[in-house]
């Protein structure tokens, strides 16, 4: 039986719907812009230590994503299902950002020798806050819009607003410096996140999730393609805890082979059962996020090697301008390019084309880039794929999903973000010091984007509409 979500009586303004996600997008953008820079230049952490800090949030987020998604399907508090999680997430994100420039003072006050433990704790709070808030921020758009074109408009505006404010943040950081950016971001995040969340009126009875219970087997089945990556992360954490040096190159190669072997039955499966389609989507999305974190985590160490003449402040500005160009195109692409393209072609095909362009850009960075203008140009081109990554997959998924389980399914879907982040943090972070040229990390990212583009092409066409509902999963 196929379930459809009842159309809300009146769609709220698309701008208002997208602002909570924009607030968390700003928090994520500031984290990407300043975290590695602060750790490398202010606190002197090595590249593998930076990777360990970045791994903190996703470890907790693996559980938090699914639990928060499930709870936000069922609870009603403070006048909404999604509202309480958004308010907590936005507030915690702002507080964590305020703490980032003061890690040494916090460590001293706590009597801790070194900042890495405090950095992990603050990053854990920031990353977990952003991760648990993004699910409700996206789910509330699907809750308050009708499936199809209206919902697509909601997600397009979500990315346009998120990208626009992120661009403004990167521009401010490039002009005034990253430290000034960290100070101005928290009040902006609170204003963008708290006020719209309080203004949006959720519908208590629709769509109801009371008829469904948490299904652990569904979660495991849908997340199965992430098994090889998750196994690598678990093994690396165990070896690190035991003080055993991991044969990281061999483990990464073996994991890559295991992922490829798992991809064959996953992508080759036929049918429109919820588990089959979710496995395809999760696998495709995980490849693209592994590539994205090659940029987010390792841009500063890459620039330190390729452009050694840059001082700390200049290095921060070059990175900020690169991320500015990346996000500026990412903000505009859904509205002016990707949205119109999806009216003529299947969303999955448009998404795959954008990811191929991203793969080309990352390959060029890894092979040729040695100057700031070249970096900015190729990151701007890659921004087309970034705009697709943060908009099209959510429209595809939410139009297919049983509305009663949307929070849970988005929680599973976001595992395709946090597990690759851990692979990049722990795996590539440990591999990076062994690489003669850190551009190799961008080549790995390029291969990941190409694999993602290919995987999205295996998403089956839908006979009755651009996107068809999943078969409902009953308890």
Image (tube, helix red, strand yellow):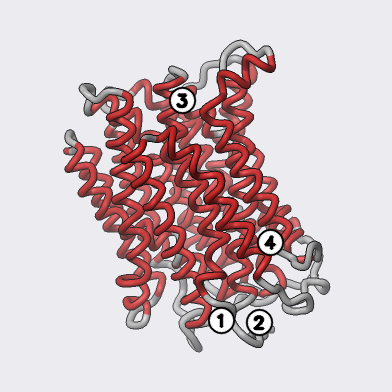
Numbered label attached to residue 5: 2
Write down the residue under mark 1. 147
Q: Are marks 3 and 4 in contact (CB under 8 Å)?
A: no
Coordinates of residue 433 in the picture (x, y in percent): 37, 21
Q: Identify which residue is drawn at 56% across, 47% down.
A: 187
Q: Identify which residue is drawn at 62% across, 39% down.
A: 95
Between label 3 and label 2, give the one nearer the viewer. Answer: 3
Q: Tell me the quarter of the picture where residue 98 sits.
A: top right
Coordinates of residue 425 in the picture (x, y in percent): 49, 33
Q: Identify which residue is drawn at 33% across, 64% down.
A: 332
Q: How many labels were placed on the picture?
A: 4
User: Left of 213 or right of it: where is 330?
Assistant: left
Q: Are marks 2 and 1 in contact (CB under 8 Å)?
A: yes
Sooner in the amino-acid sequence: mark 3 or mark 2: 2
- Dot 1 alpha-carbon crowd within 10 angstroms: few under 14, some 14 to 19, many 20 or more: many
Query: Distance of mark 3 from mark 2, alpha carbons?
Result: 46 Å
**One can see residue 2 in this view:** no
């Amino acid at each position: 039986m196929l379930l459809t979500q009842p159309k809300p009586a009146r769609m709220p303004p698309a701008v208002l719907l997208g602002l909570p996600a924009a607030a968390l997008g700003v928090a994520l953008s500031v984290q990407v812009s300043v975290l590695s820079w602060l750790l490398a230049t202010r606190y002197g952490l090595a590249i593998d230590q930076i990777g360990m800090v970045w791994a903190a949030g996703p470890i907790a987020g693996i559980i938090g994503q699914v639990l928060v998604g499930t709870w936000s399907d069922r609870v009603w508090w403070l006048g909404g299902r999604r509202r309480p999680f958004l308010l907590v997430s936005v507030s915690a994100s702002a507080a964590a950002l305020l703490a980032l420039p003061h890690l040494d003072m916090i460590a001293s006050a706590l009597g801790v020798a070194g900042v890495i433990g405090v950095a992990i704790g603050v990053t854990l709070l920031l990353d977990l806050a952003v991760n648990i808030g993004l699910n409700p921020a996206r789910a509330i758009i699907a809750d308050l819009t009708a499936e199809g074109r209206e919902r697509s408009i909601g997600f397009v505006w979500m990315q346009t607003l998120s990208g626009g404010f992120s661009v403004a943040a990167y521009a401010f950081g490039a002009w005034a410096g990253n430290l000034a950016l960290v100070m101005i971001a928290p009040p902006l995040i609170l204003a963008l996140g708290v006020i719209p969340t309080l203004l949006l009126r959720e519908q208590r009875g629709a769509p109801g999730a009371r008829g469904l219970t948490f299904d652990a087997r569904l979660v495991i089945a849908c997340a199965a393609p992430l098994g090889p990556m998750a196994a690598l992360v678990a093994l690396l954490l165990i070896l690190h805890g035991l003080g055993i040096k991991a044969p990281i190159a061999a483990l990464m190669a073996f994991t890559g082979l295991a992922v490829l072997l798992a991809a064959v039955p996953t992508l080759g499966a036929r049918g429109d059962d919820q588990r089959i389609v979710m496995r395809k989507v999760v696998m495709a999305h995980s490849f693209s996020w592994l590539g994205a974190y090659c940029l987010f985590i390792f841009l500063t160490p890459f620039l330190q090697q390729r452009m050694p003449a840059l001082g700390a402040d200049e290095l921060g500005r070059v990175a900020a301008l690169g991320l500015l160009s990346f996000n500026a195109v990412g903000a505009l692409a859904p509205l002016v390019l990707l949205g119109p393209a999806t009216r003529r072609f299947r969303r999955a095909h448009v998404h795959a084309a954008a990811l191929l362009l991203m793969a080309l850009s990352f390959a060029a960075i890894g092979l040729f880039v040695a100057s700031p203008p070249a970096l900015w140009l190729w990151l701007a081109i890659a921004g087309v794929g970034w705009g697709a990554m943060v908009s099209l997959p959510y429209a595809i998924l939410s139009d297919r999903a049983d509305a009663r389980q949307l929070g849970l399914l988005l929680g599973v879907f976001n595992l395709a973000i946090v597990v690759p982040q851990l692979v990049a943090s722990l795996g590539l972070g440990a591999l990076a010091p062994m690489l003669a040229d850190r551009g190799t990390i961008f080549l790995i990212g390029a291969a990941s984007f190409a694999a993602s583009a290919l995987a999205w092409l295996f998403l089956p066409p839908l006979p009755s509409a651009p996107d068809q509902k999943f078969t409902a999963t009953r308890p």
